[in-house]
Image (cartoon, rainbow, N blue to C red):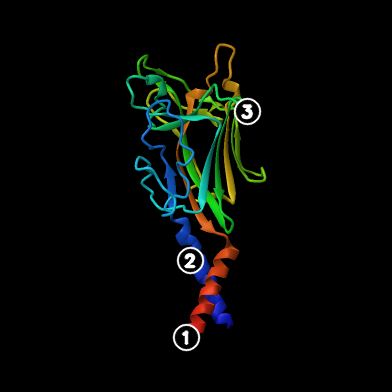
Amino acid sequence: MTFRALGMLSALAVSAGLTAQASATVLTFDFGGTNSTQILDSYGDRVGDPNVFQPPAFSYGSAGGITPNVQVDYKPVLRLGAGNSPADPTRVFGNLTNVLYRDRNAPGFSPGILEINLFADAGFLVSLHYFDMAAVYNSVTGFGEDLPAKAIIVTDGAGVELFRQDYDINNPPSTLLPGTLPLRSRRFDWDANPLRAQQIRIRIDLTQLITVGGSKVDRVGIDNIKFSQIPTPGASAMLLIGGAILGGRRRR
Protein backbone atom coordinates (compact mmCIF):
# COMPACT_ATOMS: atom_id res chain seq x y z
CA MET A 1 0.00 0.00 0.00
CA THR A 2 1.43 3.42 -0.96
CA PHE A 3 1.97 6.35 1.42
CA ARG A 4 -0.68 8.22 -0.53
CA ALA A 5 -3.19 5.44 0.07
CA LEU A 6 -2.33 5.35 3.76
CA GLY A 7 -2.78 9.11 3.96
CA MET A 8 -6.19 8.83 2.36
CA LEU A 9 -7.20 6.08 4.79
CA SER A 10 -6.02 8.19 7.72
CA ALA A 11 -8.13 11.09 6.53
CA LEU A 12 -11.10 8.77 6.08
CA ALA A 13 -10.64 7.43 9.61
CA VAL A 14 -10.74 10.95 11.03
CA SER A 15 -13.81 11.72 8.94
CA ALA A 16 -15.53 8.52 10.11
CA GLY A 17 -14.82 9.38 13.72
CA LEU A 18 -16.27 12.86 13.37
CA THR A 19 -19.35 11.51 11.62
CA ALA A 20 -19.91 8.95 14.35
CA GLN A 21 -19.48 11.58 17.05
CA ALA A 22 -22.25 13.68 15.49
CA SER A 23 -24.68 10.83 16.11
CA ALA A 24 -25.96 11.11 19.67
CA THR A 25 -28.66 9.81 21.97
CA VAL A 26 -30.36 12.00 24.58
CA LEU A 27 -31.92 10.21 27.54
CA THR A 28 -35.01 12.33 28.23
CA PHE A 29 -36.62 9.57 30.35
CA ASP A 30 -39.74 9.71 28.23
CA PHE A 31 -40.75 6.07 28.41
CA GLY A 32 -44.45 6.15 29.13
CA GLY A 33 -44.22 6.15 32.91
CA THR A 34 -45.90 8.34 35.50
CA ASN A 35 -44.65 9.83 38.75
CA SER A 36 -42.72 7.31 40.88
CA THR A 37 -42.47 4.75 38.05
CA GLN A 38 -39.21 2.79 38.28
CA ILE A 39 -36.91 3.33 35.30
CA LEU A 40 -36.85 0.37 32.90
CA ASP A 41 -33.41 -1.24 32.66
CA SER A 42 -33.66 -1.40 28.87
CA TYR A 43 -34.24 2.34 28.42
CA GLY A 44 -31.27 3.74 26.46
CA ASP A 45 -29.78 0.36 25.51
CA ARG A 46 -28.39 0.03 21.98
CA VAL A 47 -30.53 2.77 20.47
CA GLY A 48 -30.91 2.19 16.74
CA ASP A 49 -29.94 -1.49 16.76
CA PRO A 50 -32.70 -3.25 14.74
CA ASN A 51 -32.09 -6.46 16.70
CA VAL A 52 -32.91 -4.84 20.05
CA PHE A 53 -36.59 -4.36 20.81
CA GLN A 54 -37.54 -0.86 21.95
CA PRO A 55 -40.99 -0.59 23.55
CA PRO A 56 -43.28 1.82 21.66
CA ALA A 57 -43.37 4.20 24.64
CA PHE A 58 -39.59 4.77 24.51
CA SER A 59 -38.49 8.10 23.06
CA TYR A 60 -35.33 10.14 23.09
CA GLY A 61 -34.12 13.69 22.63
CA SER A 62 -34.25 15.95 19.60
CA ALA A 63 -30.51 15.54 18.94
CA GLY A 64 -31.49 12.17 17.49
CA GLY A 65 -28.90 9.75 16.27
CA ILE A 66 -28.16 6.16 17.19
CA THR A 67 -25.88 4.48 19.70
CA PRO A 68 -26.24 0.76 18.91
CA ASN A 69 -22.99 -0.14 20.67
CA VAL A 70 -23.77 1.41 24.06
CA GLN A 71 -25.71 -0.03 26.98
CA VAL A 72 -26.99 1.89 30.01
CA ASP A 73 -27.17 0.76 33.63
CA TYR A 74 -28.98 2.53 36.49
CA LYS A 75 -28.19 2.21 40.22
CA PRO A 76 -29.87 1.79 42.65
CA VAL A 77 -33.67 1.95 42.17
CA LEU A 78 -34.24 5.15 40.18
CA ARG A 79 -37.71 6.56 39.60
CA LEU A 80 -39.43 9.02 37.30
CA GLY A 81 -40.59 12.48 38.32
CA ALA A 82 -42.99 13.48 35.55
CA GLY A 83 -42.85 17.14 36.52
CA ASN A 84 -46.33 17.96 35.29
CA SER A 85 -48.63 16.02 37.59
CA PRO A 86 -50.95 18.08 39.82
CA ALA A 87 -51.50 14.92 41.85
CA ASP A 88 -47.87 14.91 43.00
CA PRO A 89 -46.33 18.39 42.86
CA THR A 90 -43.36 17.27 44.96
CA ARG A 91 -42.03 15.57 41.81
CA VAL A 92 -41.65 18.86 39.89
CA PHE A 93 -37.93 19.41 39.30
CA GLY A 94 -37.29 23.00 38.26
CA ASN A 95 -38.23 23.46 34.61
CA LEU A 96 -37.50 19.82 33.69
CA THR A 97 -40.02 17.12 32.87
CA ASN A 98 -39.61 13.35 33.15
CA VAL A 99 -36.66 13.54 35.51
CA LEU A 100 -34.82 10.61 37.07
CA TYR A 101 -34.34 10.61 40.84
CA ARG A 102 -33.16 8.17 43.53
CA ASP A 103 -35.56 6.14 45.60
CA ARG A 104 -34.62 7.13 49.14
CA ASN A 105 -35.47 3.62 50.42
CA ALA A 106 -33.61 1.67 47.73
CA PRO A 107 -31.82 -1.29 49.37
CA GLY A 108 -28.51 -2.89 48.51
CA PHE A 109 -26.60 0.20 47.39
CA SER A 110 -24.66 3.04 48.98
CA PRO A 111 -27.10 5.42 50.73
CA GLY A 112 -27.41 8.73 48.96
CA ILE A 113 -25.61 7.68 45.77
CA LEU A 114 -27.20 7.86 42.31
CA GLU A 115 -25.30 6.22 39.44
CA ILE A 116 -25.77 5.96 35.71
CA ASN A 117 -23.27 3.86 33.76
CA LEU A 118 -22.68 3.94 30.01
CA PHE A 119 -20.91 0.85 28.57
CA ALA A 120 -19.51 0.79 25.02
CA ASP A 121 -18.75 -2.46 23.21
CA ALA A 122 -15.16 -3.50 22.48
CA GLY A 123 -13.83 -1.35 19.66
CA PHE A 124 -15.97 1.65 20.62
CA LEU A 125 -15.85 4.59 23.01
CA VAL A 126 -18.78 6.42 24.56
CA SER A 127 -18.71 10.22 24.75
CA LEU A 128 -20.63 12.16 27.39
CA HIS A 129 -21.80 15.57 26.13
CA TYR A 130 -23.97 16.98 28.93
CA PHE A 131 -26.74 16.41 31.45
CA ASP A 132 -29.20 18.63 33.35
CA MET A 133 -29.96 18.60 37.07
CA ALA A 134 -32.52 20.32 39.29
CA ALA A 135 -34.02 20.15 42.75
CA VAL A 136 -37.70 19.83 43.60
CA TYR A 137 -40.05 22.78 43.28
CA ASN A 138 -43.39 22.43 45.06
CA SER A 139 -46.11 23.98 42.91
CA VAL A 140 -48.65 23.81 45.77
CA THR A 141 -46.70 25.77 48.37
CA GLY A 142 -45.06 27.97 45.74
CA PHE A 143 -41.63 27.31 47.21
CA GLY A 144 -38.68 25.36 45.98
CA GLU A 145 -35.37 24.22 47.41
CA ASP A 146 -31.88 24.90 46.14
CA LEU A 147 -30.13 21.71 47.26
CA PRO A 148 -26.36 21.06 47.14
CA ALA A 149 -24.98 17.70 46.07
CA LYS A 150 -21.92 16.65 48.04
CA ALA A 151 -20.15 15.83 44.79
CA ILE A 152 -20.85 15.33 41.09
CA ILE A 153 -18.28 12.96 39.60
CA VAL A 154 -17.72 11.41 36.17
CA THR A 155 -15.19 8.56 35.93
CA ASP A 156 -14.09 5.95 33.44
CA GLY A 157 -14.40 2.20 34.05
CA ALA A 158 -11.15 2.12 36.02
CA GLY A 159 -12.34 4.86 38.36
CA VAL A 160 -10.16 7.58 36.84
CA GLU A 161 -11.91 10.92 37.32
CA LEU A 162 -12.79 12.73 34.10
CA PHE A 163 -14.73 15.46 35.93
CA ARG A 164 -15.34 16.25 39.57
CA GLN A 165 -17.08 19.08 41.36
CA ASP A 166 -17.41 19.09 45.16
CA TYR A 167 -19.65 21.23 47.29
CA ASP A 168 -17.83 24.22 48.71
CA ILE A 169 -19.63 25.95 51.56
CA ASN A 170 -17.75 29.16 50.72
CA ASN A 171 -18.85 28.94 47.09
CA PRO A 172 -22.40 27.48 47.19
CA PRO A 173 -23.00 27.44 43.41
CA SER A 174 -20.26 24.78 43.15
CA THR A 175 -22.81 21.94 43.15
CA LEU A 176 -25.95 23.86 44.05
CA LEU A 177 -28.96 22.56 42.13
CA PRO A 178 -31.79 25.06 41.65
CA GLY A 179 -35.38 24.45 42.55
CA THR A 180 -36.67 27.88 43.52
CA LEU A 181 -38.46 30.36 41.29
CA PRO A 182 -38.03 31.10 38.50
CA LEU A 183 -38.29 27.45 37.50
CA ARG A 184 -34.91 26.47 36.19
CA SER A 185 -32.23 23.79 36.05
CA ARG A 186 -28.47 23.55 35.74
CA ARG A 187 -26.54 21.99 32.85
CA PHE A 188 -23.16 20.30 33.21
CA ASP A 189 -21.84 20.75 29.70
CA TRP A 190 -18.91 19.20 27.79
CA ASP A 191 -20.55 19.34 24.35
CA ALA A 192 -17.57 21.15 22.80
CA ASN A 193 -15.12 18.58 24.20
CA PRO A 194 -16.98 15.45 25.35
CA LEU A 195 -15.71 13.21 28.14
CA ARG A 196 -14.73 9.93 26.50
CA ALA A 197 -13.96 6.35 27.60
CA GLN A 198 -15.13 2.79 26.96
CA GLN A 199 -17.17 3.05 30.17
CA ILE A 200 -18.44 6.27 31.71
CA ARG A 201 -19.93 6.43 35.19
CA ILE A 202 -22.00 9.42 36.30
CA ARG A 203 -21.98 9.37 40.11
CA ILE A 204 -24.08 11.88 42.06
CA ASP A 205 -23.22 11.92 45.77
CA LEU A 206 -26.24 13.16 47.73
CA THR A 207 -25.18 11.84 51.13
CA GLN A 208 -25.24 15.28 52.73
CA LEU A 209 -28.99 15.33 52.04
CA ILE A 210 -29.51 12.40 54.42
CA THR A 211 -30.80 14.31 57.42
CA VAL A 212 -32.03 13.47 60.91
CA GLY A 213 -35.49 14.75 60.01
CA GLY A 214 -35.75 12.61 56.89
CA SER A 215 -33.74 11.99 53.75
CA LYS A 216 -33.93 14.44 50.85
CA VAL A 217 -31.91 12.33 48.40
CA ASP A 218 -35.04 11.88 46.29
CA ARG A 219 -35.43 15.64 45.87
CA VAL A 220 -32.64 15.99 43.28
CA GLY A 221 -33.12 14.79 39.71
CA ILE A 222 -31.10 14.29 36.51
CA ASP A 223 -32.35 14.66 32.94
CA ASN A 224 -31.34 15.06 29.27
CA ILE A 225 -28.19 12.93 29.35
CA LYS A 226 -26.61 13.31 25.90
CA PHE A 227 -24.05 10.73 24.80
CA SER A 228 -22.62 9.41 21.56
CA GLN A 229 -20.38 6.61 20.37
CA ILE A 230 -17.31 6.50 18.15
CA PRO A 231 -15.11 3.60 17.04
CA THR A 232 -11.68 3.51 18.67
CA PRO A 233 -8.93 4.87 16.38
CA GLY A 234 -7.50 1.37 15.87
CA ALA A 235 -10.89 -0.12 15.05
CA SER A 236 -11.64 2.69 12.57
CA ALA A 237 -8.32 2.20 10.78
CA MET A 238 -8.72 -1.58 10.61
CA LEU A 239 -12.22 -1.27 9.16
CA LEU A 240 -11.04 1.17 6.52
CA ILE A 241 -7.91 -0.82 5.67
CA GLY A 242 -9.98 -4.00 5.43
CA GLY A 243 -12.39 -2.24 3.11
CA ALA A 244 -9.55 -0.94 0.98
CA ILE A 245 -7.96 -4.39 0.70
CA LEU A 246 -11.27 -5.99 -0.28
CA GLY A 247 -11.85 -3.23 -2.82
CA GLY A 248 -8.40 -3.79 -4.29
CA ARG A 249 -9.02 -7.52 -4.61
CA ARG A 250 -12.30 -6.95 -6.38
CA ARG A 251 -10.67 -4.61 -8.89
CA ARG A 252 -8.13 -7.31 -9.74
Residue placed under numbered mark 3 in the picture: 110
Disc 2 residue type (three-letter): Ser
Q: On residue 46, which mark appears?
A: none
Query: How far apart are the two marked residues, 2 and 3, measured between alpha carbons?
Result: 42 Å
The residue that disc 1 covers is 251
Residue bearing mark 2 = 15
Nearer-the-camera pick, 6 or 183: 6
Q: CA distance from mark 1 to mark 2?
A: 24 Å
Asked if the residue under mark 3 is in contact with the one under mark 1, i.e. CB atoms within 8 Å, the reply is: no
Residue 81, position as x, y percentages in the image? 41, 28
Q: Earlier in the sequence, mark 1 or mark 2?
A: 2
Secondary structure under tag 1 reads helix
- Residue 114, image x, y percentages: 56, 31
Report the residue at 52% width, 66% height from top: 14
Under tag 2, what secondary structure?
helix
Q: Earlier in the sequence, mark 2 or mark 3?
A: 2
Badge 1 density bin: few <14, some 14–19, many ≥20, Cα 10 Å: few
